[in-house]
Amino acid sequence: EVQLVESGGDLVQPGRSLRLSCAASGLPFDDYAMHWVRQAPGKGLEWVAGISWNSGDIAYADSLKGRFTISRDNTKNSLYLQMNSLRPEDMGVYYCAKDSRFFNAFDFWGQGTVVTVSS
Amino acid sequence: QSALTQPASVSGSPGQSITISCTGTSSDVGTYNLVSWYQHHPGKAPKLMIYEVSKRPSGVSNRFSGSKSGDTASLTISGLQAEDEADYYCCSYAGSSTYVFGIGTKVTVL
């Protein structure tokens, strides 16, 4: 059974940093690209970043302006999101999502981890 | 990367059919047949319902169907059931390994 478990969400002050993690199990992790998708309170889903199976192809949403870094460690079956210079508008639930590999879709999601940015 | 446009809400009675539109641009929906749809019950993980405009993953009911014309994709739910009440999001590949989601549509079963 595929499982994606996010962690690392916390209450942080504006301007601070936070690192999210996503632990994958039940799948050959290094076969798949992975993504982070977020949902601000009362808002819709927003694609944040994606990373190919070997980290050779990485992409970000334009709105992040270089503040976030996605990475992965295939030896640990883990995906990461380093978030710097956090802003109140970065608040929300952050989901880890598995790429469908051939169909440019997200075919499995974690339950999410909550990030709160407030002073 | 502007969010795709969806109606804020759509409602229908049990057994009826409803259609949710998803309008993008020639940079995303209009160029790529890589539109997917997700069902999201609040507090739960989103679920893939349609990929590549009109294909259903294994296990998804055939009451869900997708289509696309020009810059607009659509999701149709036929034989509406109480369990279909949820938020629905479209998503399109937008080139250069990026994606854009729609603003979301709340489906209410009357």
Image: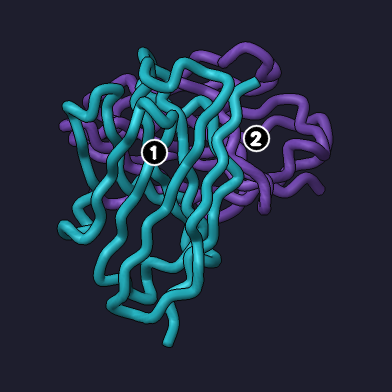
Chain colours: A cyan, B purple
Label drawn at residue A35 = none
Residue at 24% from the left image edge and 50% from the top image edge: A69
Q: Amino acid at mark 2?
A: Ile
Query: Furthest-bottom residue in view?
Result: A119
- In terms of image quadrants, where is residue B80? top right
Residue at 46% from the left image edge and 21% from the top image edge: B51
| Chain to which mark 2 belongs | B
Which residue, given by chain and number where applicable, does mark 1 sit on? A79
Against B14, residue B43 (above or below) is below
Q: Amino acid at mark 1?
A: Leu
Residue at 29% from the left image edge and 31% from the top image edge: B93
Quadrant of the drawing holding the C terminus of chain A: bottom left
Residue at 60% from the left image edge and 30% from the top image edge: A3
**Within-10-Å neighbours for mark 1: few <14, some 14–19, many 20+:** many
Query: Label 1's element?
Result: strand
Question: Can you give x and y, in whole percent of width and height, for residue A92 in the image?
Answer: 49, 63
Question: Can you give x and y, in whole percent of width and height, for residue A40 in the image?
Answer: 47, 63
- Image side of residue B104 versus residue A88, left or right: right
Against A105, residue B41 (above or below) is below
Q: Nearer the viewer, mark 1 or mark 2?
A: 1
Same chain check for tags 1 and 2: no
Decide which of A45, A3 is in the foreground and name it. Answer: A3
Decide which of A8, B102 is in the foreground and name it. Answer: A8
Query: Label 2's element?
Result: strand
Question: Can you give x and y, in whole percent of width and height, for residue A96 in the image?
Answer: 47, 41
Which residue, given by chain and number where applicable, does mark 2 sit on? B18
